[in-house]
Image (spheres, rainbow, N blue to C red):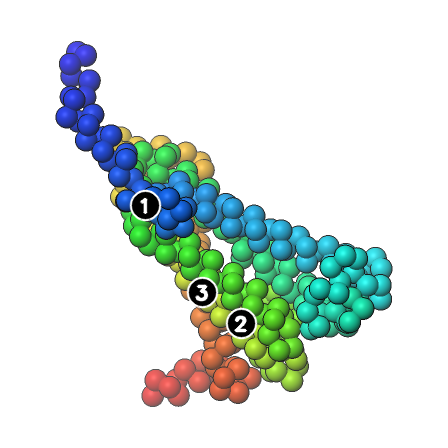
Amino acid sequence: MNALITPTSAETVHAEDMHHDHGHGSHGIMKYLWTYDHKMIGLQYLWTSFFFLLIGGALAEGMRFQLGFPNHPLPLIGKMLPSTLVTDEGVIIPGGYNMLVTMHATIMVFFFVMPVIIGAFGNYLIPLKIGAGDMAFPLLNEISYWLYVLSGFIMLGAFFAPGGAPGTGWTAYAPLSAVAAYNQTQLGQTLWGAAIFVNGLASIAGATNYITTIITMRAPGMTMFRLPLTIWALFITSILLIFAVPVLSAASNLLVTGNRFFGSISFGFSDILKFTS
């Protein structure tokens, strides 16, 4: 009986080779920057999301300082912040509080909560819990992470745009977010919409990878109803992302292109019919 279940030496060597080749040839610093290993990508999501947590937390502290000590300069860092947010003395300008609220909420939702729960835990746990060697599309997995990083840099760039970061709230309702005369920061709002669009591409790529991996790469004997509840939660969340994020990305794209570059306040179904007719 032992001979039936004990792997041969050739199988053992092949398994070891597969284990050593799991990083697809990444060595040195590239192992941490560009890798197909699902566990390393999960850690990339984890540490990057913690970086954005620090930024979002700092913005939250600025909000609370403004509420507790209005018209007082921010301690330590007040004079180092851009003039679009504070005065020369480090006091938050009248519209600065709206910027803090908008960017804090956006960063916490799209750049911390979603990436750390879905990106970090999903990448790290799904292959381990279903008995798969890696994700179904390892390259797409790494591309989705770097799209997430790119969207973060675009979002942070809004702080340095003329007029500063948007102060229209993290929902960015039009026409406040669509008319530069209302929000006073055309480029900042445009960068916000572009960042949400790129972040949506990352979410769609990751959700597609999760669904495909769970459906097609389960270990023999592991039916869908034997999956751990953690995997079921990530699976259903991925399906919801596939339905919701494309709509959000399309809306942010319309905000940037239709409303801002083409000067139209409303861009609805009638406009689509004009383009298609």
User: What kind of residue is marked 1?
Assistant: Ser
Q: How far apart are marks 2 and 3 (CA)?
A: 11 Å
Secondary structure type for disc 3: helix
Residue 213 seen in this snapshot: no
Residue named by callout 3: 198
SS class, disc 1: loop
Residue 157: image location, x then y, percent: 56, 68
Q: In this view, does 243 lie above or below 45?
A: below
**Residue 106 appears left or right of 8:** right
Q: How crowded is mark 3: few (under 14 residues within 10 Å), some or many (20 or more)?
A: many
Q: Is residue 151 above or below residue 125?
A: below
* Disc 3 to disc 1, C-alpha distance: 26 Å
Side (left or right) of 73 relative to 125 = right
Q: Is residue 216 visible?
A: yes
Q: In which quarter of the image is the N terminus?
A: top left
Label 3 or label 1, whichever lies nearer to me, is: 1
User: Answer yes or no: do the residues labelled 2 and 3 have beta carbons within 8 Å?
Assistant: no
Q: What residue do we see at 57% from left, 51% from top?
A: 51
Looking at the rendered structure, the kind of residue marked 3 is Val
Whether tag 2 and tag 1 are in contact, CB under 8 A, the answer is no
Farthest residue to the top: give it.
1
| For residue 87, above or below residue 12 | below
Q: How crowded is mark 1: few (under 14 residues within 10 Å), some or many (20 or more)?
A: some
Q: Position of residue 171 (x, y in %)?
A: 59, 66
Mark 2, residue position: 191
Q: Which amino acid does label 2 sit on?
A: Leu
